[in-house]
Amino acid sequence: MEKLKNAAQTDDMVKEVLPDVWRIEGFLSENFWGSAPSSTTYVLRDEDKVYIIDPGTLPYYKKKMLDLVSMYEKKGVKEVIMLVTQGHFDHAINCDVVKETGLPWKFYLPEEEIATTRSMINDIMSDYDELEKWEDVFATEFPGNPLFEMTEKKSHRLTKNVLRTIVEETVGHDDNHMVDEATILRPGSRIAKQYGSVTLTGWNIGRFFISFDGSHSRGHICLYDPKYKIIFSGDTTIEINPPFLYSSMDKLIDITDKYKTMAHEGYIAYVMDAHRSHDMNKVFETMGISANKYETEMYTSTSGDSEAFFDFFCNYYKEMKKEILAAHHRIGRATIGEIVKELLKSENKYIKFKASLKWPELPSRLDAAVAVVLRDGGAVPVEADGKIVIDPIG
């Protein structure tokens, strides 16, 4: 993994992809819990302001961001704006870099993302608490794991404490005090913006539009640049979706369908997401994961490719939802674990792809995806015969 990490720190990972649009490529390893990822960072100039999107986790990224801000300060830039597409640690740990620029700054954060940004550790653990209302998490996610089997024999609290320790080791630095200095974007201040036949909701900022979707996380946003027709899509287009109970498959379907339409109508030419990277391609290759060609590009650069990119993800989410509901209907009242087992019998290429993203090496959890789909559909978990079961929807 050190080889991959070193590769992410070479200068060829820092690229000006369009005038005043810089991309600092992210990092991903074959072991999420052993070597935590870092999102791709974008640095943009708009007149006398520099915008930083998703500053990531690696200290190396701070130096590159500061170098770019310093370069633009000499060209007349007077303020730095920080945005995170979500508050997850791999996107937001470095957001205090704005304090090191020496320039006036603002950190804009949606209200719904405050808790996640403040503490990813508490965020993950509270999501596990909610997921436990739907399933026996440790039996489903870590079947046969000797560590958790041993701790469960002693006490469930011990098991959760062990999991918390593992999360803390992965996340590392936590308790992000930048939240206390953020300019909070309130739900009541959102506006509707029309792009062809598509309506987005969010906030104007300079020439950009902050598009709110609340899909991957409660306060997830994307950034749209009408000048270059770029959508910085964050984690709306990531294979592990939906990774948390608070994620929403329906919102993922909705937003990727909207962006697909915008690309089809010529409003999006470039898609720059938060994790497409050479490292991700190496991980896919090493793990034997067969990826769609649009997933291996660093970014798309035509409306046609952007439409196809969003079409893949929109279909991926739609098919996953359809197959989950179908598997549940085949077996009737069942536990999440039983639905997952039935789902894995599917010949659907999207389910096979999702299943190839092995947990826990990658944070892709079929049990969470199942719970999210059922939750979105209005299902209610109940206890029966000592198990948590759910009746099929409809």
Image (cartoon, grey):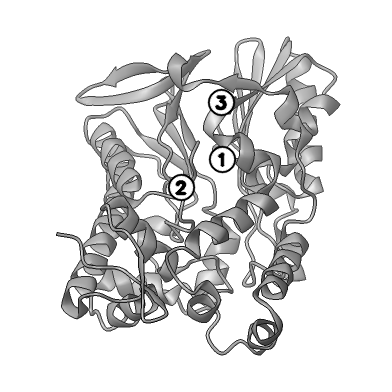
Q: Is residue 263 above or below residue 361?
A: above
Please report whichever mark, 3 or 1, sits nearer to the chain's N-terminal start.
Answer: 3
Query: Which mark is nearer the camera, 3 or 1?
Result: 1
Residue pictured at 19% horizontal, 25% vertical: 197
Residue contact at pointers 3 and 2, CB within 8 angstroms: no
Q: Would residue 73 be visible to someone looking at this image?
A: yes
Element at label 1 = loop
Find residue 86 and name its label: 1
User: Mark 2 highlights which residue?
Assistant: 216
Residue 227, picture quadrant: top left
Dot 2 crowding, Cα within 10 Å, few <14, some 14–19, many 20+: many
Residue pictured at 75% horizontal, 60% vertical: 168
59 left or right, relative to 391: right
258 left or right, relative to 175: left
Classify the position of the N terminus by image quarter: bottom right
User: Mark 3 highlights which residue?
Assistant: 19
Please report whichever mark, 1 or 2, sits nearer to the chain's N-terminal start.
Answer: 1
Element at label 2 = loop
Residue contact at pointers 1 and 2, CB within 8 angstroms: yes
